[in-house]
Image (spheres, rainbow, N blue to C red):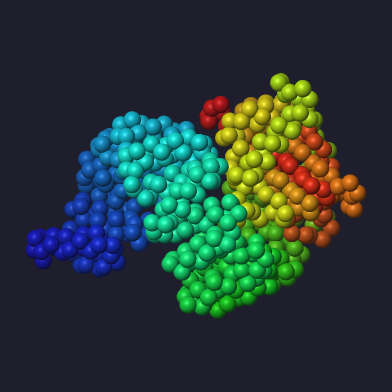
Amino acid sequence: MKPGEAQAIANASRALFAQGDPVGAERVLKPVFNQLRSDASVLHLMGLIKRAQNQLEEAERYLRAAVAYSLNEGGYYNDLGVVLQARGSYDEAMRVYRAAQALTPQATAVRVNIVRCLMEMNRLAEAEQEARAFVQAAPSAESWTLLGQVQRTQERHDDAVASAAEALKYQPRLRALQLNHANALDRAGRGREALEVYERLAKQELDTAELALSYARALFTEGKKEEAEAVLEQGVAKWPASIPLHTTLARARWLRGEGEKATALAEEEIARRPDDIPLRLATADALHRGKHLQRALQVLADALQVAPQNPAVLTAFGVILDELDRPLDGLKALRHAAENSQDERNAKRNLLSTLIRAGQPQEALEIARALRRDDPHEQYLIAIEALALRALGDESYKAFNDYERFVRCYSIEAPSGYFTVHNFNATLADVLRRQHRIAAHPLDQTLHNGSQTGRNLLALKNPAIGAFMKAADEHVRDYISRLTPEDPVGARKTERYRYESFSSTRLLNEGYLPNQVHDRGWITGLYTVACSPAEQRRYPRAGHIMLGAPNRPVANCGPEMWIEPKEGLLVLFPSYIWHGVAPIEGAELLTLTFDVTPVASEEGA
């Protein structure tokens, strides 16, 4: 074939790709590809085609070749960076993006990708710096919106509102920017202002699933529950494939008392589209959250008729069987899932709890120890290792669960500016209760008769929270000073540390916190801000912190330590120790929870 003809075919492939048909584009390009494989633009095209089909390894190979043949084409570097980022090679992606930026300093796409890559790397301070440089170099709706996204990830919601408002100044009539501004208001606790925007947009046209979801959630928060359901029903009718709409509607109906009928519309949609496995999984999850385990099991059994080898369905099926006290059957499903999963690590991790409950703790112990070789500080794996040893009757588990050494209770003194600790806690409680009203959305909660704040409260910059952190830090330093390098907690001891996952839980009468571990933590703190016990207590350990019992019961492995909640009490313990709160009796138990994590010396202060 003549070179001109081959190029014409390549151009036809490029046109098909531009029309959103990567499969057709590849089919057209393949016959002439070898003839043109030294052409950087053709290599680049094939890389984009492979990326569009999520064949990332091949995409990387072709894009690297394109860069090698055309070292000065910044766009090729940028597209290679996108693939490297998608494959998790963040450091190399950043180097490639920097090269693209040097070649095309005015390219906004490169700036955006640099910020997004830094966000995925959790280097948020650098991401903000780059976003601000973008705003300074090219102030626009796009640059201000990007800065707002960084601020939202940092949970600086008031700043994100300001950035969203700046973005609106450039294109005030653009609906997407109005919706972004309303979302920012919502996250900042300004729900009524957000609702006004959602309502105005919806009256013009309910044109996106995102608007339907945001509008419905805002209505629900304001107590307009029937209107919220109506919007969600309208949304699932217009966007039947939207899983967030289906799951939110199911949750709203469940809260209204519909029980397992709450998922009726989702199940009707499944009947129309039986191959929609994600919707089947979401429906089962909604039923699971509502404790309708038999119905959830049936939904998953039906899904297995359609996709008998699907690892996600098999895993969910195994978990439900385990929770129905059929751990041997659950283990069979989980092993089948592991055989079909491409994520070997997670597949093995999913086996652990059920192995122990099925009477096979030795295998769980071996798997947990093998997985810890790659990530020795993953708290769940440490918890499983200790639990497996305990189930085996091996006293060495006490090296992990040494409650006398590793669980410490401290009394917080009144911070400067407060007459008494009670006065301080009353102020702090008012701050937290407001956050539970504005930031703990009822449609998101999984607690029984309680709520958890969904944002990092440190981002509030509130004086009472700041005073608590200053007072608590003295005790955190004391706790860390007592650790030794030989123990499983002290092995991570460093001079520097940071506070993370700072949130609040509010339990009302008969509310409880299920047993859990904080997987990415190191030291966990739990502080009682307010507690209102019942006048006559039926249960002597109501509202007590329980330590040692796993999330699903294991024979002879119940709680080993109980701590009575008292206003002003701070409890510090390793994040891998199972902990929960027994059902309370009384009006309220209000707590703060945080994790302390070590900071490596190269990370700085």
Residue 386 screen position, x and y as percent: 75, 50
Q: Residue at x 66, y 47 (%)?
A: 452
Question: For residue 28, which quarter of the picture?
Answer: bottom left
Q: Is residue 398 visible?
A: no
Q: Name the residue rendered at 50%, 49% in the picture.
A: 195
Q: Nearer the viewer, residue 368 or 330?
A: 330
Q: Position of residue 143 (x, y in %)?
A: 35, 38
Specify the quadrant that holds the N terminus: bottom left
Q: Is residue 402 left or right of residue 538?
A: left
Q: Position of residue 109 (x, y in %)?
A: 31, 43
Q: Quadrant of residue 437?
A: top right
Q: Looking at the image, which residue is at 74% across and 59% down?
A: 552
The quadrant of the image that shows the C terminus is top right
- Residue at 22% x, 43% y is 73
Say left or right for 310 vs 260. left
Front residue (pair 55, 112): 112
Report x, y in % for residue 375: 60, 46
Q: Nearer the viewer, residue 236 or 514?
A: 236
